[in-house]
Image (cartoon, rainbow, N blue to C red):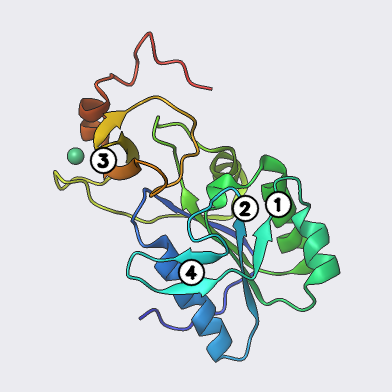
Amino acid sequence: MLSMVIYVAKLYFFYGAMNSGKTTRILQCAYNYEEKGMRPIIMKPKTDTKGADKIVSRIGATRKVDYLIEKNENIFDSIINEYGHVDLILVDEAQFLTTRQVNQLMDIVIDLDIPVMCYGLRTDFKGNSFPGARRLLDIAHELTEIKTICDCGKKAMFNVRLVNGKVTTEGESVAIDGEGKVTYTVACSRCFRMKTRKKFDHPETVYE
Ligand SMILES: [Zn+2]
């Protein structure tokens, strides 16, 4: 159990590979705030279809998301116009936010004095940062890496995509875990290179 903490109004980014317990932390955080009679809201970009309007932790806990963020939505305006008093904003799958939406979260922190805690992946299965994660790494006040372990025992930093159980380096960056035959595993830098059969500096490695 995490002890009760009231967070300072800052933009926080908790990042890690898949299965690092990010969602469990969000649920705990929301619970702690509610227990003190405060009002947290949980948001999630709509891109992620896993559990639709729920967030689902690996240990099986679920909770309905208060707020699904549309791709072109101005989050600042939505908070002002629709949400009334909010004590804490928690964002799951924050890597799927747009650059502008991360900027809007920063404005929320500054203008509305609300702490915003974003949780998400640092990189996609090609080892490239998602736009939302990149912007958070640029401007968040506090960066916290949530560590998880590769099969070899080293820190896992990367997500490896498997299609029908076989490693792939092809496809769009967004293919949600559990949809179709796509699954993911995590890897350290060395195992990521071995599994994808590509050196990090490789002439055919052209990423958007
Ligand atoms: Zn490894």
Residue closest to the far left: 152
Image quarter of the C terminus: top right
Q: Give the x, y percent position of residue 26.
A: 48, 69
Callout 4: SS: helix
Displayed quadrant of residue 202: top left
Displayed quadrant of residue 72: top right
Q: CA distance from mark 1 to mark 4?
A: 20 Å
The mark that comes first in sequence, 3 or 4, is 4
Q: CA distance from mark 3 to mark 4?
A: 24 Å
Q: Are marks 1 and 3 in contact (CB under 8 Å)?
A: no
Determine which residue is flagged by label 2. Answer: 46
Q: Amino acid at mark 1?
A: Glu
The mark that comes first in sequence, 2 or 4, is 4
Q: Are marks 1 and 4 in contact (CB under 8 Å)?
A: no
Judge by depth and name the residue closer to the eye, 26 or 5.
Answer: 26
Q: Amino acid at mark 3?
A: Ala
Q: CA distance from mark 2 to mark 3?
A: 27 Å
Q: Amino acid at mark 4?
A: Ile
Q: Is residue 157 visible?
A: no
Q: Residues within 10 Å of mark 2 (few under 14, many from 20)?
A: some
Determine which residue is flagged by label 1. Answer: 70
Callout 3: SS: strand
Is the CB–ligand 1 distance for label 3 below 8 Å?
yes
Q: Amino acid at mark 2?
A: Lys
Determine which residue is flagged by label 4. Answer: 26
Query: Which residue is depicted at the point 81% across and 70% down?
Result: 82
- Judge left or right: residue 71 versus residue 57: right
- Judge left or right: residue 24 versus residue 140: left
The mark that comes first in sequence, 1 or 2, is 2
Q: Give the x, y percent position of residue 63.
A: 51, 74
Displayed quadrant of residue 25: bottom left
Determine which residue is flagged by label 3. Answer: 187
